[in-house]
Image (spheres, rainbow, N blue to C red):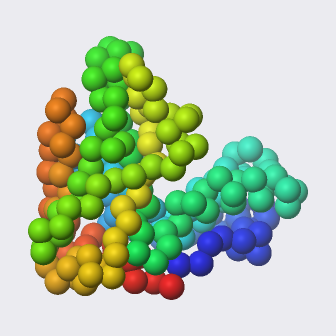
């Protein structure tokens, strides 16, 4: 899947004209790529379209108009556009009150490394993060409410993914959950894994 470039990003006026239809299309894509784990954790599998909308919205909200400003956003979000054999996701802890934040953020330290994709052949692929993510969002006694993770599959694991049901487990001792991908999400993610 190709990364976003400056040429992909509409200027503010053009985006305003296209925004309603563009957002509606991408929100439908997001719906097919979102997984809820229990009551407070959501995993959004990102792709080129979701990141395109993210950059467009950031440019709109922050009033970014120069190539240099837009390039900073592209450099920030392009790592979440998956490459061949990779699935990239944003993990959200859906905590809406100070009480929930105080309860869950200390309990869920390490949650970003606690997701395991279980393939039909029995292989288990654990979520990973980048070093800069770890330096910025991982702390010893408290976690962040948002994490950026990825799953990296080799060619044999991609073939296994293609062959049947795929499950994602969370094996964090304070948050044990499991979700089996539905057919729509499975097809979306298989497209990510096999795109060039």
Q: How many marks?
A: 0
Residue sitting at x 59%, y 78%: 2
Above or below, 104 relative to 165? above
Above or below, 191 relative to 92? below
Task: Report the front residue among 195 and 130.
Answer: 130
Q: Is residue 135 left or right of residue 118?
A: right
Q: Position of residue 93 (x, y in %)?
A: 35, 36
Whether residue 101 is visible: no
Task: Report the front residue among 140 and 90.
Answer: 140
Q: Is residue 63 left or right of residue 187?
A: right
Tell me which corner region of the image, top left, top right, bottom left or bottom right, holds residue 122.
bottom left
Q: Position of residue 105 (x, y in %)?
A: 35, 24
Q: Is residue 193 left or right of residue 184?
A: right
Task: Report the front residue among 132 and 174.
Answer: 132
Residue sitting at x 58%, y 43%: 132
Residue sitting at x 85%, y 56%: 68
Tell me which corner region of the image, top left, top right, bottom left or bottom right, holds residue 16.
bottom right
Q: Position of residue 27 (x, y in %)?
A: 44, 62
Whether residue 51 is visible: yes
Q: Position of residue 191 (x, y in %)?
A: 38, 80
Residue sitting at x 13%, y 73%: 120
Task: Report the front residue among 113 and 99.
Answer: 113
């Amino acid at each position: 899947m190709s990364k976003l470039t400056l040429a992909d990003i509409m200027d503010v006026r053009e985006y305003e004209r296209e925004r309603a239809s563009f957002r509606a299309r991408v929100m439908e894509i997001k719906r097919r790529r979102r997984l809820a784990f229990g009551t407070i954790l959501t995993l959004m599998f990102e792709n080129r379209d979701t990141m395109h909308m993210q950059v467009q919205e950031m440019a709109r909200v922050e009033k970014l108009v120069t190539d240099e400003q837009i390039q900073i956003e592209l450099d920030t979000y392009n790592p979440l556009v998956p490459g061949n054999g990779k699935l990239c996701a944003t993990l959200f802890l859906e905590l809406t009150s100070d009480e929930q934040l105080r309860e869950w953020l200390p309990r869920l330290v390490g949650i970003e490394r606690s997701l395991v994709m279980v393939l039909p052949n029995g292989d288990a692929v654990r979520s990973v993060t980048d070093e800069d993510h770890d330096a910025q969002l991982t702390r010893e006694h408290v976690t962040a409410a948002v994490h950026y993770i990825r799953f990296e599959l080799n060619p044999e694991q991609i073939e296994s993914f293609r062959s049947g049901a795929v499950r994602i487990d969370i094996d964090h001792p304070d948050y044990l959950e499991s979700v089996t991908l539905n057919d729509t999400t499975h097809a979306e993610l298989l497209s990510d894994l096999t795109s060039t």
